[in-house]
């Protein structure tokens, strides 16, 4: 019986030595628990990250040729400097237009013309008014 116990102890010792070499000194149960915690945390992080992109599909990005280039910018407005008159520039002669004579001057001339033509006194008023408006 002692022989069996020694054999069992030896085999357990051998197994523990082999697990210590494999796990780096950590007990087998502790290594499994640690691996389960790491795996659970990775699953939780990846689930929350994928929830942020729920409506977005992952794949190749759209081709840049699908979006047309923007139209060219309009040309800048043309700025023109106004012409400023110079103080020393020669004065250009303006065409002199004789002013139109006043209405009373035209009536007087038309009355003289009517008398020279021999128009009677009663008809001179109508003639002089029509003559003044013509000119």
Image (tube, helix red, strand yellow):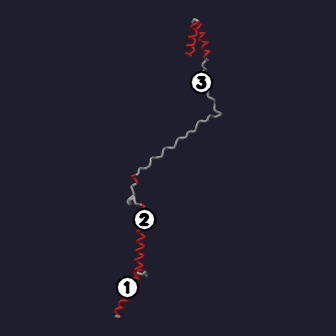
The secondary element bearing badge 3 is classed as: loop
Residue, disc 1: 15
Residue, disc 3: 95
**Residue contact at pointers 3 and 2, CB within 8 angstroms:** no
Q: In what quadrant of the picture does the N terminus appear?
A: bottom left
Question: Picture coordinates of residue 124 (x, y %)?
Answer: 58, 9
The secondary element bearing badge 2 is classed as: helix
Question: Picture coordinates of residue 130 (x, y %)?
Answer: 55, 13
Q: Nearer the viewer, residue 125 or 88?
A: 125
For marks 1 and 3, give the CA distance.
127 Å
Q: How many marks?
A: 3
**Residue contact at pointers 2 and 1, CB within 8 angstroms:** no
Sooner in the amino-acid sequence: mark 2 or mark 1: 1
For marks 3 and 2, give the CA distance.
91 Å
Sooner in the amino-acid sequence: mark 1 or mark 3: 1
The image shows residue 78, relative to residue 90, as above or below, that is below
Looking at the image, is mark 1 or mark 3 nearer the viewer? 1
The image shows residue 71, relative to residue 89, as above or below, that is below
Q: Residue furthest bottom?
A: 2
Label placed on residue 48:
2
Q: Dividing the picture into quarters, in which one does residue 33 lie?
A: bottom left
Q: In what quadrant of the picture does the C terminus appear?
A: top right
């Amino acid at each position: 019986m002692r022989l069996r116990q020694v054999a069992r102890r030896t085999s357990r010792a051998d197994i523990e030595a082999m697990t210590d070499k494999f796990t780096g000194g950590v007990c087998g149960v502790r290594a499994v628990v640690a691996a389960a915690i790491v795996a659970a945390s990775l699953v939780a992080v990846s689930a929350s990250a994928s929830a942020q992109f729920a409506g977005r599909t992952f794949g190749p990005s759209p081709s840049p040729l699908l979006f047309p280039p923007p139209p060219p910018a309009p040309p800048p407005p043309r700025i023109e400097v106004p012409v400023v008159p110079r103080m020393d520039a020669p004065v250009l002669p303006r065409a002199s237009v004789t002013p139109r004579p006043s209405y009373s001057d035209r009536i007087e001339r038309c009355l003289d013309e009517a008398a020279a033509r021999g128009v009677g006194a009663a008809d001179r008023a109508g003639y002089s008014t029509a003559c003044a408006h013509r000119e």
